[in-house]
Image (cartoon, grey):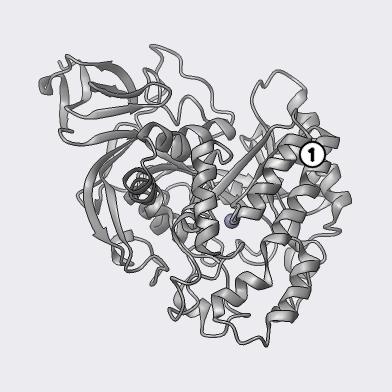
């Protein structure tokens, strides 16, 4: 009998917190059972030769929108397959009631079981959900939601008072909320902080914030509407960095007052980063973590000029100076993690008119590839830091560490085996998403996963998805690994 189900040999293993070591990995019952330099090919029922490859912890794509424009089932089936291409083995998706998603309203006690059932059996990655309490009733469900394994919540600053004129509907009808204002936000913050403090959960329960100010967007939109700018530049100027900065400061004041842990999502600009640093300085006790996205690190509106509206997203794609500022913030630790904000949005939903075009696009397949190409190869960011950005930091922020986001004995054997020298020019086909276009099209990217393992099983190899969907719901906080124990 072999010592392991699978033996991986010959790879450079990037162990978060330690660095790259040349060693074998023994996998048993879906977990890492050994890291050792004398593991031989015959030690496993199955052998994976990782010679010439680096082994990274499977990425945690912590910003995702399963089911935003298609059914949960359809998105789970195709979009999580796309995640495997980029080395992500766990996704944590945002969900709210209201239009888009499941088009439902009512208590999460009724909706959450349906949401999980719709995802289960279709997802190729492990998955979790962040939930947005849209009504007073939902705020009353926060404690119940935490008990169900939902350790993170969301508030959208830009739905507050926004008149979505393009849809001839208002924010209230759109979100199906009662009063979506700062009173609602304050009560949500108080309740999340209270639930986290009580009991001995000992894990982080947090609130994620989409920081853009609605009133300013309404005004700037009117200003740029007829200015004749290129479309995506006009979009950026209709939601300028000032709208992020203002919401970030408001978030800081309210989070400090309520002692809630917060995550600033998808910061896109130098000005937003300055605001995040200022808020940290003002409120040093605040647990404030900062996210940016693959697309804000890789794209500018100038690059996308003349290429349609595929790159319309909130917050918008900005300038080269903003991209540089984001990379500096990644390097100096202002930013904790990078996610894709993946939303499968077909070309027909974009159309050819800027204002009605639906926002968002997919990028999950580029999570490790862009970090490696633009970060490691171009900017000499250490592999260790890239593992933190894509995997360890989001796992820690959202209550999955160290079962996820690490390579250690007892952790889930979620691994991305990466060829640092492999280069591809991005096409929609390469990404294995249902999305029929990509704003990243034509960009040369160097550093791609050649094999992805989920809990010890190969789920992606040589450009193809392997096997049927085997993703499981990840209740958070996820219990720490117990040595010798197996839950299959
Ligand atoms: Zn998002």
Q: Is residue 361 above or below residue 66?
A: below
Judge the density around disc 1: few (<14), some (14-19), many (≥20) Cα neighbours within 10 Å.
many
| Location of residue 336 by image quarter | top right
Residue drawn at point x = 42 percent, y = 49 percent: 123
Residue shown at 51% from the left, 45% from the top: 328
Q: Quadrant of ligand 1?
A: bottom right
Q: Nearer the viewer, residue 191 or 416?
A: 416
- Classify the position of the C terminus by image quarter: top left
Residue 223 screen position, x and y as percent:
73, 80
Q: Position of residue 273 (x, y in %)?
A: 63, 48
Give the residue drawn at x 46%, y 79%: 308
- Residue 44 as seen in the image, left or right of residue 253: left
Nearer-the-camera pick, 99 or 121: 99
Quadrant (top left/top right/bottom left/bottom right) for the N terminus: top left
212 left or right, relative to 386: right
Say if 131 sits above or below 479 in the image: below
Q: Residue furthest right?
A: 183
Residue 204 position in % (x across, y down): 65, 29
Reply above or below: 7 against 99. above
Helix, strand or loop at mark 1: helix
Q: Is residue 230 left or right of residue 183?
A: left
Q: Nearer the viewer, residue 276 or 471?
A: 276
Q: Is residue 424 visible?
A: yes
Image location of residue 51, percent across then percent down: 15, 33
Residue 138 in sight from this viewpoint: no
> Which residue matches tag 1?
255
């Amino acid at each position: 009998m072999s010592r392991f189900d699978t033996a991986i040999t010959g790879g450079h293993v990037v162990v978060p917190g330690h660095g790259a070591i040349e060693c074998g990995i023994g996998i048993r019952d879906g977990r890492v059972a050994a890291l050792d330099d004398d593991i031989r090919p015959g030690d496993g029922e199955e052998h994976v030769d990782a010679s010439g490859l680096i082994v990274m912890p499977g990425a945690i794509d912590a910003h995702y929108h399963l089911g935003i424009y298609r059914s949960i089932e359809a998105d789970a089936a195709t979009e999580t397959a796309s995640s495997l291409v980029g080395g992500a083995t766990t996704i944590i998706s945002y969900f709210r009631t209201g239009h888009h998603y499941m088009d439902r309203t009512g208590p999460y006690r009724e909706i959450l079981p349906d949401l999980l059932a719709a995802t289960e059996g279709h997802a190729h990655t492990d998955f979790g959900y962040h939930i947005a309490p849209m009504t007073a009733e939902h705020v009353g469900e926060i404690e119940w939601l935490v008990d169900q394994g939902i350790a993170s919540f969301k508030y959208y600053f830009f739905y507050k008072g926004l008149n979505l004129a393009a849809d001839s509907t208002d924010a209230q009808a759109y979100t199906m909320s009662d009063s979506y204002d700062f009173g609602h936000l304050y009560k949500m913050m108080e309740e999340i902080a209270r639930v986290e403090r009580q009991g001995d959960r000992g894990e982080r329960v947090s609130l994620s914030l989409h920081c853009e100010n609605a009133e300013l967007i309404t005004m700037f939109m009117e200003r740029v509407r007829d200015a004749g700018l290129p479309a995506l530049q006009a979009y950026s100027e209709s939601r300028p960095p000032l709208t992020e900065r203002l919401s970030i400061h408001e978030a800081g004041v309210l989070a400090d007052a309520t002692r809630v842990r917060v995550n600033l999502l998808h910061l896109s600009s130098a000005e937003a980063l300055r605001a995040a640093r200022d808020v940290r300085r003002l409120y040093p006790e605040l647990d404030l973590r900062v996210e940016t996205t693959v697309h804000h690190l890789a794209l500018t509106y100038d690059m996308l000029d003349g290429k349609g509206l595929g790159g319309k997203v909130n917050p918008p794609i900005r300038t080269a100076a903003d991209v540089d500022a984001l990379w500096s913030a990644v390097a100096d630790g202002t930013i904790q993690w990078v996610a894709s904000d993946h939303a499968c949005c077909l070309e027909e939903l974009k159309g050819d008119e800027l204002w009605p075009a639906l926002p968002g696009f997919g990028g999950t397949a580029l999570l490790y590839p862009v970090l490696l190409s633009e970060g490691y190869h171009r900017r000499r960011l250490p592999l260790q830091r890239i593992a933190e950005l894509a995997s360890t930091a989001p796992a820690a922020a959202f209550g999955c560490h160290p079962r996820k986001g690490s390579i250690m004995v007892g952790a889930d054997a979620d691994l991305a085996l990466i060829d640092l020298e492999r280069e591809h020019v991005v096409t929609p086909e390469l990404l294995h998403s249902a999305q029929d276009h990509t704003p990243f099209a034509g960009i040369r990217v160097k550093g791609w996963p050649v094999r992805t393992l989920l809990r010890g099983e190969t789920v992606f190899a040589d450009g193809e998805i392997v096997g049927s969907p085997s993703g499981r719901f990840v209740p958070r906080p996820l219990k720490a690994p117990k040595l010798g124990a197996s839950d299959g």
